Amino acid sequence: MIRWLLLALGGALLGGIVHLATIIILPRTATQDAYARLSRIVPINTVTALPEPTAESAPMPFMDPAFASAVCRYDLSQGPLKLNVPVSLAYTSVSFYTRYDVAYYAINDRAAGRRVIELDLMTVEQHNQMPEDEEITAADRLIVESPTLTGLIAIRALAPEPGFMPMAQSAIANARCVRADEPKPSR
Amino acid sequence: MRLLLGSLFALVVAAVVGLGATYLALTRGAAFGPLTIGSWTAWPKTGTADADPYARASIARIGRLPTALGDGVAFTASADDNGRPLDGRCDVVLAGVTPAARFWTLTLYNADGELVANSIKRSGFTSQEIVRHADGSFEIVAAPRANPNNWLPSGGVVRYVLLLRLYDTAVGVSTKAGREVPMPTVNVRSCP
């Protein structure tokens, strides 16, 4: 009897390890996480508008239907990215997610304090390699460090009333994410 | 033979305990540092780089992008103030005020995070759409049939969740439940 109790206790302890291991491994093996879902519909290093969520279909669960949203799926292996997001009337936010959908940075129009949210996105190594005295480090450009090489930038503009949705969508349509060494596309 | 049987038993116990605990943690949406006010719960830390492994696992399983803390905070309610699960066939009244925020949105989802189909194509309210009382408080009725006041159609689904997202708000990791963070009460008024 004692023997079986000890075995059960040992099994329970091992179960605790199994539990922790599965919790930690799960994000790396998930095939239906937000990044995987979006990878099928958005190309890399460009801003793509997401369809509005409806009862029939949505790109992701739990999307806020009051927002017009776009996504830039980034890959920094070729170099840093420049992000330009014009601010819409009501509320605009830009959130950064790692490859495993962890939000590591977000900024909204008020925090940016200007009509356009301008950011440089780079990895920690790329930031360290940047010459310190160069003009790019001027205070007017915000630098965001990505913990992973790939990830997602979610650009969202609020339509406070349904009638404002076209306006929010057009503001987001002018958002750009481009490689920093490429010439700016003319608008 | 006894050794084999014993270790097999221990391994079965380990698998049941381990996977069972993982399943429970993920379906309950467990994570550290919940901020609970009335029926509403938010996990402000889940929207930061410090998100704990439980939060990361549940984000990956659901397949959503969490609301980043620099953007806002998302409060979830799946039961009313008396602990009754939210049922789309009942009239559920939300009354009161929200914490200070530049904007907020209230959205109704089914248990899988999908919007619920309805005739007027309304799945939520923003802070600007709502009709308020003179003192700034409001009343929203989530019900299957049209209702005076701010009617949020629940489409008659058996279970739903409400998400109240505060955008550009001071509510965050260091917030304690208290008078400065008033959340609307949630009460089932009538059930067929």
Image (cartoon, coloured by chain):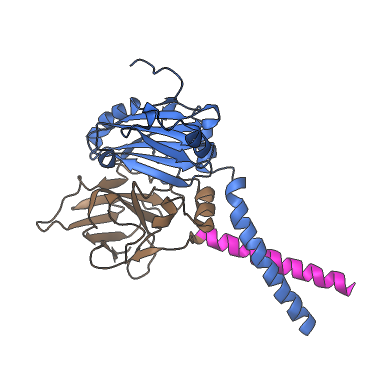
Chain colours: A blue, B brown
At horizontal 46% and vertical 42% (from top left) the residue drawn is A97
Q: Would you say A117 lies left or right of A121 here?
A: left
Number of numbered discs present?
A: 0
Is residue B15 covered in magenta? yes
Image location (x, y in percent) of residue B118: 33, 44
At horizontal 39% and vertical 47% (from top left) the residue drawn is B68
Residue furthest left in the image: B134
Corner quadrant of residue B18: bottom right
> Which is more toward the observer, B41 or B173?
B173
As displayed, is residue B126 above or below residue A185?
Answer: below
Please state the extent of the stretch shown in magenta in the rendering.
Answer: B1-27
* Residue A31 visible here: yes
Q: Quadrant of the N terminus of chain B?
A: bottom right
> Which is more toward the observer, B17 or B49?
B49
Corner quadrant of residue B19: bottom right
Is residue A32 covered in magenta? no
Dominant secondary structure of the residues highlighted in magenta in the image: helix
